[in-house]
Amino acid sequence: MEKQKKEPLHRSFGYAFEGIAAVIKKERNMKIHCCAMILVVMAGTILQISVWKWCICFCLFGLVLALELVNTAIEAVVDLVTEERRALAKLAKDAAAGAVLVSAIMAAVAGLMIFIPEGIQFLQEVL
């Protein structure tokens, strides 16, 4: 059995970035997540949140965006395999979408826990 030669590392990264760009262009929810991420970065910069809070934010950004990428991949594979409405296809798509939703809700809750006290403190200092 002959071993296949692996792609150069830069090509692997290139494919990954192509996938990310394609999902950002194609998927409305990914655009929403990216906009939310930009708003959080702006708020964090204005409020000068601590390094630990930035770490939490970036971990949550990564989690939500990664799950959105996986969700899109699962939807694409299911659509590739069958055009029929099947219970297992629906379960796969719904479960993947549910994973994104759970992570987005938890990220929003954590964000509120970080930014509400920071915002209150900022307003007290400004006013």
Image (cartoon, rainbow, N blue to C red):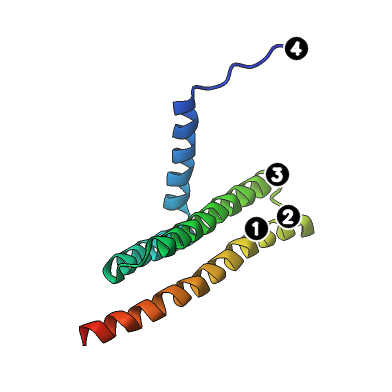
Q: In the drawing, what numbered circle is on residue 1?
A: 4
Q: Residue at (44%, 27%) from the top-left corner?
A: 10
- Which-is-in-front pick, marks 1 and 2? 1
The first of marks 4 and 1 along the sequence is 4
- Which-is-in-front pick, marks 4 and 2? 4
Residue on which disc 1 sits: 96
Q: Residue at (67%, 15%) from the top-left corner?
A: 3
Residue 15 position, x and y percent, is: 48, 34
Q: In this rendering, is residue 113 above or below 70?
A: below
Please, what secondary structure does the residue beneath circle 3 have?
A: helix
Please, what secondary structure does the residue beneath circle 2 have?
A: helix
The first of marks 1 and 2 along the sequence is 2
Residue on which disc 2 sits: 89
Instruction: Name the amino acid type tagged 2.
Output: Ala
Between the residue at mark 3 and the residue at mark 4, the CA separation in whole angstroms equals 29 Å
Residue 116 position, x and y percent, is: 40, 80
- Which-is-in-front pick, marks 3 and 4? 4
Q: Are marks 1 and 2 in contact (CB under 8 Å)?
A: no
Q: Are marks 3 and 2 in contact (CB under 8 Å)?
A: yes
The first of marks 3 and 4 along the sequence is 4
Q: In the drawing, what numbered circle is on residue 81?
A: 3
Question: As rendered, which of 86 and 75 lies closer to the eye?
Answer: 75
Between the residue at mark 3 and the residue at mark 2, the CA separation in whole angstroms equals 9 Å
The answer to which image quadrant residue 35 occupies is bottom left
